[in-house]
Amino acid sequence: MKPLLRSFASATTLAAVLLVAAAAPAASIVLDYTYAGGSFFSTATANGVKARSSVQAAADYFSTILTDSLPQVSRPSNYISTPPGGGTPLTYSWTWQARFDNPSSGNEVLISNPTIPADEFRVYVGARDLPGSTLGVGGPGDFTSSSGGSLYTPEQQAEIQAISADFSELLNNRSQGAGNFGAWGGMLSFDTTSNWNYDHTISPTGGQNDLYSVALHEIAHALGMGTSNEWNALVSGGKFTGPNAYAANGNSQPSVTGGHWANGTTSTVFGSSTSQEAAMDPTITTGTRKFWTTLDAAGLADIGWDVEAPGLPGDYNSDNLVDAADYTVWRDSVASGGVIGSYAEWSVNYGRSAAASGLAVPEPTTGVLLIIGACWGAVGMRRKSVI
Ligand SMILES: [Zn+2]
């Protein structure tokens, strides 16, 4: 019985730690399948369920490492002006529309006056037959806004102007301050005709494109990586001048290609010392998985995100290794009602260690390279035979 008692005590301690972490304000990537289209993400199919789970795991990763507080996005309450001498009240009002490409068609979507809750970064997810060899596209959402009405006094006008100024900051960069990216959300779309590894709990086999890896990459584009004014402001002479990326790249400004790090840029898996090609370079080798790296995280920080290095996710017994013992901790926590982590988190990180090794994936020496293209609002991963 001793091991059981020790295990229970350990789980209780971990639960307390996780509760503290959960109390901190943090951006949350919330996936929305309203415009999913077709069967790719259908919950009636095994692959659709796996696909959703993979994109969710990628979204959860960013929700874990991003600690920004994001204000609610909604239109201000109407401003009612009453005349100084009494009389008919006048109304001034504001409206806005979230604008993005429908992920299942590419056509523009306009949603009038949505409310995006505090800390939510909403990402519309879907799939369609993307042109050519494009694997996926992703980018931040846009908006339109307008206001109008009547008022009586200069004081009322000044108050209305102040509300308008705050609303403009909220829509333009989620009130994150100059130089910091912010938005209500964005969109992602995946190609319906590519050969996918839908299952994020297993590594892709040869010839399969890894949905989890592509989801990580495209969500980062939705978060402004390579797709925002804040990113572009830090690119000069083919180099990325952000101080965090400079430090993460060995005190050297990393080269950039469009909205990506230069092809072949390497870093270390974020939170570990495992060397890996950066997630946000333009290529990924078919049949392999790529995780988020230290340089990728530095790029996010440079465009204004608050990024926290992860503990080793899935390491529920804190022995710096994700293994069967962590599964046992998770399973026991479910049985006891105080759930620690998740099966998905454990399974995707199975085999990783904090010190060195990383997931046991094959060396990316063979296979077809994928080229990831970039343009505003539609940043794609492409397959192309390079070697
Ligand atoms: Zn890209």
Image (cartoon, grey):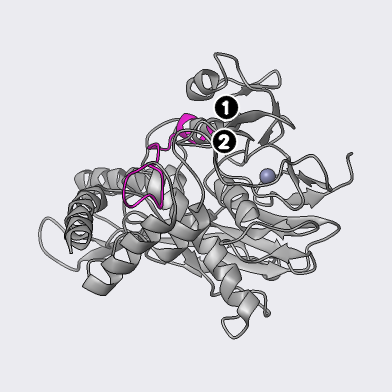
Circle number at residue 229: 2
Using the rendered image of the protein, determine whether residue 122 is visible from the camera's viewpoint: no
Residue visible at 61% across and 65% down in the picture: 199
Expressed as whole percent of the image width and height from the top left, the position of residue 153 reads 21, 49
Q: Amino acid at mark 1?
A: Ala
Mark 1 surroundings: few (<14), some (14-19) or many (≥20) residues within 10 A: few
Residue 25 appears anywhere in the view:
yes
Residue 143 highlighted magenta (yes or no): no
Magenta region: 299-319
Quadrant of the rendered structure where residue 113 is? bottom left
Cα distance between the residues tagged 1 and 2 = 6 Å
Q: Which residue is mark 1?
A: 233
Q: Name the quadrant of the N terminus.
A: bottom left
Asked if disc 1 and disc 2 are in contact, CB closer than 8 Å, the reply is yes
In the foreground, 192 or 210: 210
Q: Quadrant of the C terminus?
A: top right
The total number of labels drawn is: 2
**Mark 1: secondary structure:** loop
Please tell me in which quadrant of the rendered image residue 358 appears.
top right
Q: Amino acid at mark 2?
A: Asn
Foreground: 29 or 358?
358
Query: In the drawing, does residue 341 fall left or right of residue 285?
Result: left
324 relative to 42 in the view: left or right: left
As helix, strand or loop, the secondary structure at mark 2 comes to: helix
